[in-house]
Amino acid sequence: VKMAALVTGKKTDTVSVCLLDIAPNTEIPVHTHDPQVDSIFVVSGQGKAFVNGNWQDIEAGDYIFVPVLEEHGIRNSGAASLRLFVHHSPPLL
């Protein structure tokens, strides 16, 4: 997983923003954040997201909202990179 930090807590105390590039057959394991909420926009690629207790298919154009302490994870099940625009509030980075 490659990450480009676009906005960090060093610049603001309200959000952090990053671009994630997840290679095929790679997974970000199921995890939680406290006290952050996540807003995730699928920029390109295909995969699966674990949210609300289930794995669901995701693709370019999809949006995922993850409340505080909600278990979530991402898996690239496609043949190309899965790119995600991720916003955490308050900042995670």
Image (cartoon, rainbow, N blue to C red):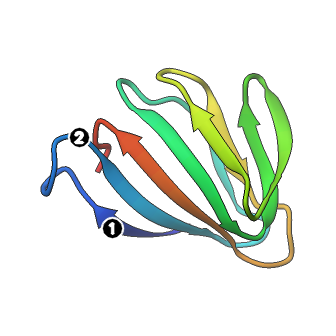
Q: Is residue 41 above or below residue 64?
A: below
Q: Is residue 76 visible?
A: yes
- Which of the labelled discs sits on residue 6, or is there none? 1
Q: Position of residue 61 (x, y in %)?
A: 73, 60
- Residue at left offset 28%, top offset 43%: 91
Rendered image quadrant of residue 6: bottom left
Disc 2 residue type (three-letter): Thr
- Residue at left offset 29%, top offset 36%: 90
Q: Is residue 30 visible?
A: no
Rendered image quadrant of residue 72: top right
**Relative to the observer, which residue lies in front, 85 or 20?**
85
Rendered image quadrant of residue 66: top right
Image marks 2 and 1: residues in contact by CB distance under 8 Å? no
Q: Residues within 10 Å of mark 2 (few under 14, many from 20)?
A: few
Q: Is residue 37 above or below residue 87?
A: above
Secondary structure beneath label 1: strand
Q: Position of residue 32 (x, y in %)?
A: 51, 29
Q: Residues within 10 Å of mark 1 (few under 14, many from 20)?
A: few
Which residue bears the numbered disc 2? 14
Q: Is residue 41 left or right of residue 56?
A: left
Q: Is residue 74 above or below residue 3?
A: above
Secondary structure beneath label 2: loop
Q: Is residue 41 left or right of residue 47?
A: left
The numbered mark, 2 or 1, whose residue comes first in the sequence reads: 1
Q: CA distance from mark 2 to mark 1?
A: 14 Å
User: What residue occupies the far bottom of the structure in this picture?
Assistant: 80
- Residue at left offset 32%, top offset 43%: 92
Disc 1 residue type (three-letter): Leu
Q: Is residue 18 above or below residue 50?
A: below
Q: Position of residue 69 (x, y in %)?
A: 50, 21
Q: Quadrant of the N terminus?
A: bottom right
Q: Is residue 70 left or right of residue 10?
A: right
